[in-house]
Amino acid sequence: MVEQSHSFHKRSSQIVVAFDSTHEALTCEQMCKEQDIPGRLIPTPVEIKADCGLAWAMLPAEKEAFEIKIAGSLKVAGIYELDL
């Protein structure tokens, strides 16, 4: 019998920022890159109700820098902590 190895993605806590427009999500991505705040655009998780299908995901350690440098410049629909 051959044993199959399964690769499972380990869930980790992520900060997810939701937006009401794609423009805001893309602006967030650009601003975060300029401010060296690591993260990436992801499809908005189904747990979040937002008008935009894109959200910004980052590690919890980046939340404070995001709130100080970025959040006030964007229309943010919500900031959530989820296991992704």
Image (tube, grey):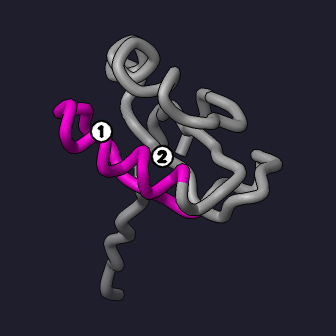
Neighbours of disc 2 within 10 Å: few (<14), some (14-19), many (20+) = many
Q: For the residues marked 1 and 2, what is the alpha-carbon distance in whole angstroms?
A: 10 Å
The magenta span reads: 24-43
- Residue 32 vertical placement versus 10 (above, below): above
- Residue 70: image tag: none
Residue at horizontal 35%, vertical 19%? 69
- The residue lying toward the viewer, choosing from 11 and 19, is 19
Kind of residue sitting beneath label 1: Cys
Examine the structure image and report whether residue 31 is included in the region drawn in magenta. yes
**Where residue 4 sits in the image (x, y, percent)?**
35, 78
Q: Residue at 69% x, 60% y: name it.
A: 52
Q: Residue 20: horizontal and vertical position, in percent? A: 71, 51
- Using the rendered view, name the quadrant where residue 74 is placed: top right
Badge 1 crowding class, 10 Å Cα cut-off, few under 14, some 14 to 19, many 20 or more, is some
- Magenta includes 38? yes
What residue would you read off at disc 1?
Answer: 32
With respect to residue 58, does 51 lie above or below? below
Q: Which mark is residue 56?
A: 2
Q: Residue at x 45, y 43 (%)?
A: 57
Outermost residue toward the front?
73
Location of the N terminus by quadrant is bottom left
**In the rendered structure, are the residues bearing label 1 and label 2 in contact, judged by CB atoms less than 8 Å apart?**
yes
Residue 21: horizontal and vertical position, in percent?
65, 57
